[in-house]
Image (cartoon, rainbow, N blue to C red):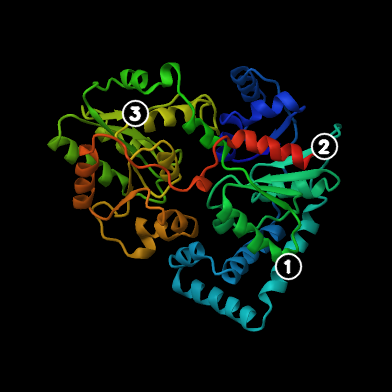
Amino acid sequence: MLITNPYAATNVIHSGLIKRLSYRYELYIMSDIICNKEITVINDHFHMHVDLLPLTFPTENIVIKLLRQIQKAIYFDYFKIETQKIRDLQRPWLKARFITTILYILSSLGLSKVTLQMIRKGIISLTKRIFSNNIHITFDGIISTSPLDIRENTIVNSLPGIRSLAIIISWDNLTSKGVINANHHSVLVWNQQMAQEYKQFYQIYNDTADVFINGSPRFDIYQEPLFGKYMPENFRRTLNIPAASKVILFTTSAHKHFPNQCDILRHLTDYAALHPSIIILLRFHPADDPLLYSLFSDLSCIRIWKPEKRFKYIPDLDSLLVLASMLRLCDVCIQVASTIRLEAAITNTPCISVAYDGNLNLPFSHSVKRFYSFSHQTAFNAYQQDYRVHSKWELFQTLDSLLDTPQRLRKIRNPQKCISQANQTTIQYIQKWLN
């Protein structure tokens, strides 16, 4: 199993999937974010045994890097992917005009498709012999948990005699990360929409992979009972939140995506000042900077969750349980265009999606509003599981409405968004993949 991404780690490790696999198979991890000390902690935590392969991932050379940049530009243009169109709005005018012109010429001459085919074939060929295979174990299969990472592609391509399986780890991967430059025997995706995307995008490469819909293993935890310190009432005591208080959970976004999040927190504290029984629970995105919120730490209406940081690159092993407890504890969840929208829907938690830029009025190309028009977001928008707010006034009005509701009446409307028992389904497909 190849693990090069913290989000992938939560999907296969924190979810408990790796534990179930370790009971069935002799499992080895190759990772650049997990070391020997950490694998010992992981084994102890899950009462299992997996080994760490002491090998180094190959670095991407300049030729492959350049080819992939060209590949991405043509790929997004050829399939008219909305996410990239929005990102292009931020490019300097001259650079954007140059790239657009080249892409237009390729498209006009009918060369886009054949160019994509040639580049992918070239990348696969160039990566086949980069990895120094000092492995003295005969593997029955390779699982790539971040199949859009060129390093994982390189490992798969360098070991062509071994069956490979790709797990698409997030709902945006196929429309935002570029191309999978490896030919896998099987591919696991979250839902029907992603399965259709994969077949549409990779049919030009004559891809023959079996595509299975397995859900997301990390979401299983949100559908299971919580015990011990993770029970909402116990978690409430841990955070010193009075039983009579209503809780607003604010889950921040990456700072580079939404640098004005402090404005939203100020708006929430203004709301709490009008409603003394309100407690705001603040949960940081891993790529957000907690120091930005230091001015709020002494406010009585704020509770800041500071998880234990035992690992350098991956979240603490109970991070999914903590988030599940927070979502069940809170009365309303506030988020910014993230998978929290799905997780809130799964736990039947009323969810507000921030679609305004705090105290600023930014153009669409730089506004947080643009994220809700990304390809992977638009499909979820249609299910109307959340409440989009475009101003401080709308935020207050929506909070009034949701917090006055005596019980949670909304239920997840589309089960294909999140298959229950995804761990079990994933294992069944892995068994099928390995025959």
- Image spot of residue 63 (x, y percent): 71, 60
Q: Residue 102's image quarter?
A: bottom right
Q: Amino acid at mark 2?
A: Asp
- Marks 2 and 3, the one that precedes in the sequence: 2
Pick the residue in front: 225 or 111: 225
Q: Which mark is residue 329?
A: 3
Q: Amino acid at mark 3?
A: Leu
Q: Which mark is residue 89?
A: none
Pick the residue in front: 371 or 158: 371
CA gap, disc 2 to disc 1? 29 Å
Q: Nearer the viewer, mark 2 or mark 3?
A: 3
Residue matched to label 1: 117
Q: Residue 208's image quarter?
A: bottom right
Total marks in image: 3
Seen in the picture, residue 32 relative to 60 is either above or below; the reply is above
Residue appearing at x 69%, y 29% in the figure: 21
Seen in the picture, residue 26 relative to 260 is either above or below; the reply is above
CA gap, disc 2 to disc 3? 44 Å
